[in-house]
Amino acid sequence: MASKGQQLLAVLCAALLVLGAAGCGSKEAAPEKAPLVKTQQAGGNAGAVEGVYAGTVKGRYETNMAFQVGGQIISRNVQAGSLVHAGDTLMVIDARDVVQQANQGEAAVGQARAQLELAQKNLARYTELYNESAVAASVLDQYQTNYDAAFASYQNALAQAAKGHNAVGYTNLTAGADGVITAVQAEEGQVVAAGQTVLTLVQTGELEVEINVPENRVAELQEGTPVRVSFWALHTDAEGTVREIAPMADPAARTYRVRVSIPQPPAGMELGMTASVALAQSDTDDAAASVLPLAAIYQTGDTPQVWVVTDDDTVTLKDVTVEEFNGDQVIVHGLQPTDLVVTAGVHKLRDGQQVRTEADD
């Protein structure tokens, strides 16, 4: 017969077993935690949609200036950055050789004139003899030919002499318009050839912005396209218009040179300033495009879709129209600027599923 202590111990163990079993049976399973998703606002990258290109302020008319005759430079009156006016003398070359050439032209004219006078007298003399039937017609034809040749030589000598006189004037390089000297490629004492660039003159009367557009985006531009130009140094914007698009890409950079005119340039706009050119955005939000990561596209049929997080933190599918693929990005239409789009793990979601976003955490 068991003692009272052993009976009491057995009762306590039984009670503990009953309580433990009751506790295990009443424990509830922990609720499933909503998955954390990476999101992006559809209208949060308008700059990428528009296309923003870095540019430089340049003159519309940029002239590489050169002498029309060769010689040694004896005077340089300007330097890079000099403001000049139409008619100003920029450089002068030694004119001695050119003057000698002009003198040779004058001497050639005198010689040709003497030959012409002699041919004219001979022709007059043999014309009288022919009228008196003293010489044959063939003899008269010969002297007529000699006169015609002498007259042509005289005309040629006059043209050469005029060319020589003009060359004397070409020894002074003058500005054809108001502007600024942006580059100097020759110095005093240097011998230059005719047509060799010695200065670069940019007219300051009309400034514009030059940008380089990649070949996969140049189709978005055409002459007359409105753009918005901002200037880093001026902290201001201006309206611009695409004026010119290069017909072929640069062979090295594979970009197209685009010139943007600015009808009303801001105060302080100067050559060489840095500018940013942005394509004008559409006025309607429905027509605006969104740039999303390629991983955001969810497509099981013919229509591409994206997961959009609703106000109650659930996801729903929304149809989109793909405009263009660009590397690991895609340009789509059909989203509102405020739509919060899931950009990763889209194939693990289901319609109406509760999710968590970075903002929630």
Image: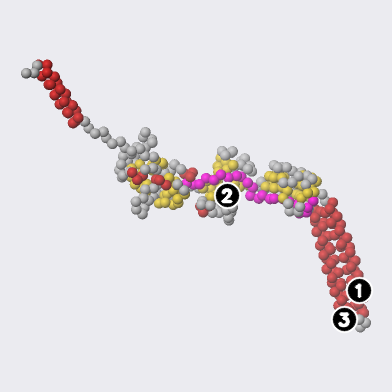
Give the spatial CA distance, label 2 vs label 1. Answer: 72 Å
Which of these two is toward me, 125 or 237? 125
Residue 289 visible here: no
Q: Who's the residue at 58% across and 45% down the image? A: 55
| For marks 3 and 2 on the same chain, the one whose residue lies earlier in the sequence | 3
Q: Which span is picked out in magenta?
A: 49-71
Q: How far, Cα to Cα, is label 3 from label 1? A: 14 Å
Picture disc at residue 253: 2
Secondary element at tag 1: helix
Relative side of 348 to 217, left or right: left
Is residue 132 or residue 21 the one in the foreground? 21
Q: Which residue is mark 3?
A: 137
Q: Helix, strand or loop at disc 2?
A: loop
Q: Which one is earlier in the sequence, the residue at label 3 or at label 1?
A: 1
- Amino acid bearing label 3: Ala
For label 3, the crowd category at 10 Å Cα-Cα, with few meaning under 14, some 14 to 19 and many 20 or more, is few
What is the spatial separation of the Cα atoms under label 3 and label 2, in whole angstroms? 75 Å
Q: Is residue 213 left or right of residue 133?
A: left
Crowding near the residue tagged with mark 2, few <14, some 14–19, many ≥20 C-alpha atoms within 10 Å: few
